[in-house]
Amino acid sequence: MKAHAVRMHSQGAPEVLVLEEIDLPAPGQGEVLLRQKAAGLNFLDVYQRSGSYPIPMPAGAGNEAAGTIEAVGPGVTGFKIGDRVVYQGGTMGAYADARVLPTARLVHIPNGIDEETAAAVLLKGMTVEYLIERCVSLKAGDFALMYAAAGGVGLIAGQWAKSLGIKLIGIAGGPEKCELARKAGYFAVIDRNNEDIVARVKEITGGKGVPVAFDSVGKTTFQTTIDCLAPRGYFVSFGASSGKPPAVEASLLQSKGSLYFTRPTLATYCASPEDYAYSAKRVMDMLASGAITATIGRRYKLAEAAQAHRDLEAGLTSGSTLLVP
Ligand SMILES: NC(=O)c1ccc[n+]([C@@H]2O[C@H](COP(=O)([O-])OP(=O)(O)OC[C@H]3O[C@@H](n4cnc5c(N)ncnc54)[C@H](OP(=O)(O)O)[C@@H]3O)[C@@H](O)[C@H]2O)c1
């Protein structure tokens, strides 16, 4: 069977993403054939494409998609033809109209949730789940800081935190993105283009600083984040949209007030099948209860994958971005 997939033959600029016709084998032992309706765009895809994360080439692009099972291979249990499923992680290659893949990472999409919503929310929602609920222990009334508040992860984080009573302070670039973040439930929003982040964080927290800062920007924000933390605060460095943060000096953590520094990844926090299933179910439950909703900022055709990457890297997107066949 023929399918269409966005592939890379080398790492580099967005132009390395090329839509190709590929041959799909029949599903083998423990595998299914999935007809995909939407793939989620994630900053991880940019690191894998640009060479920031070295990947053996050639490779498929993309890490998250949703669709309907069209065929099942031998030995498959728990999934049947017609089931609607979503997945994140595993072998790259999610930017495709159809795919053969193992069932290990497939999650049933509950009734009432469409495939686009599932693809827009699974990876980013699982990220928010482990950051807010397992990486650090935050409780109702606590302050925390989140960069890229109007981005894919950011808009989900604002809603999630609000539902738990956490006072999440968002940082976003420009008035429109700040307004989006405010509507998503952030306790307060700071415009990084027009305001002094450290001064505003101190003002909002009564001079104390935040006990937890989630920094996904990396290189350009490291010092600001350190300066926003309260003594004994947690620096959660979970991304590098602007490049890698500098090496962390133990003496800096000491002099700034016994700070903690962690660099967590979703891969570690959902490495076991139990953790993966737990986190995915928590996201689906949050969606089903209405505590979080998907904000799909823009849809691109698979053939426009390079442009989608350019726009994500340039900070031109907001909410979740989808690639659709
Ligand atoms: N560790 C993990 O487990 C994990 C899992 C998922 C995602 N992440 C990280 O979470 C972050 C958000 O991912 P996402 O897919 O939802 O992307 P996103 O937030 O939708 O897009 C990135 C945003 O970062 C902000 N930004 C600030 N400075 C930037 C710069 N110099 N270059 C580019 N962007 C800059 C921009 O928003 P403003 O203009 O509003 O500031 C931009 O829109 C990424 O860093 C990603 O790597 C980490």
Image: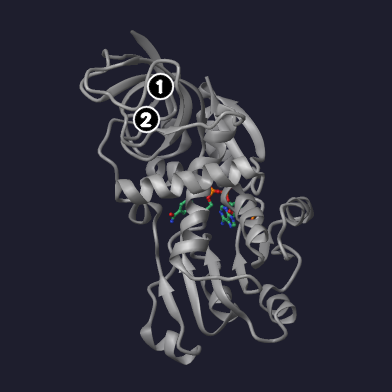
Task: Name the element at disc 2.
Answer: loop
Residue 84 against residue 276 in the figure, above or below:
above
Q: Which mark is residue 93?
A: 2
Q: Viewer-proximal residue, 6 or 28?
A: 28
Q: Viewer-proximal residue, 211 or 139?
A: 139
Q: Viewer-proximal residue, 88 or 108?
A: 108
Q: Identify the residue at image location x=48%, y=73%.
A: 235
**Sequence-first tag of 2 and 1:** 1
Mark 1: few/some/many CA within 10 Å (<14, 14-19, 20+)? many
Q: Identify the residue at image location x=68%, y=60%.
A: 162
Q: Which mark is residue 72?
A: none
Q: CA distance from mark 2 to mark 1?
A: 7 Å
Amino acid type shown at disc 2: Gly
Amino acid type shown at disc 1: Ala
320 displayed left or right of 84: right
Q: Viewer-proximal residue, 101 or 317?
A: 101
257 displayed left or right of 292: left
Q: Identify the residue at image location x=35%, y=39%.
A: 11
48 displayed left or right of 320: left
Q: Is mark 1 within 8 Å of ligand 1?
A: no
Q: Is mark 2 within 8 Å of ligand 1?
A: no
Task: Name the element at disc 1.
Answer: strand
Q: Position of residue 316 (x, y in %)?
A: 65, 44
Q: Position of residue 240 (x, y in %)?
A: 47, 58
For the image, the number of numbered tags is: 2
Q: Position of residue 166 (x, y in %)?
A: 64, 67
Q: Is residue 53 visible?
A: no
Which residue is identified by label 1? 5
Mark 2: few/some/many CA within 10 Å (<14, 14-19, 20+)? many
Residue 6 against residue 321 in the figure, above or below:
above
| Residue contact between numbered discs 2 and 1, judged by CB atoms under 8 Å | yes
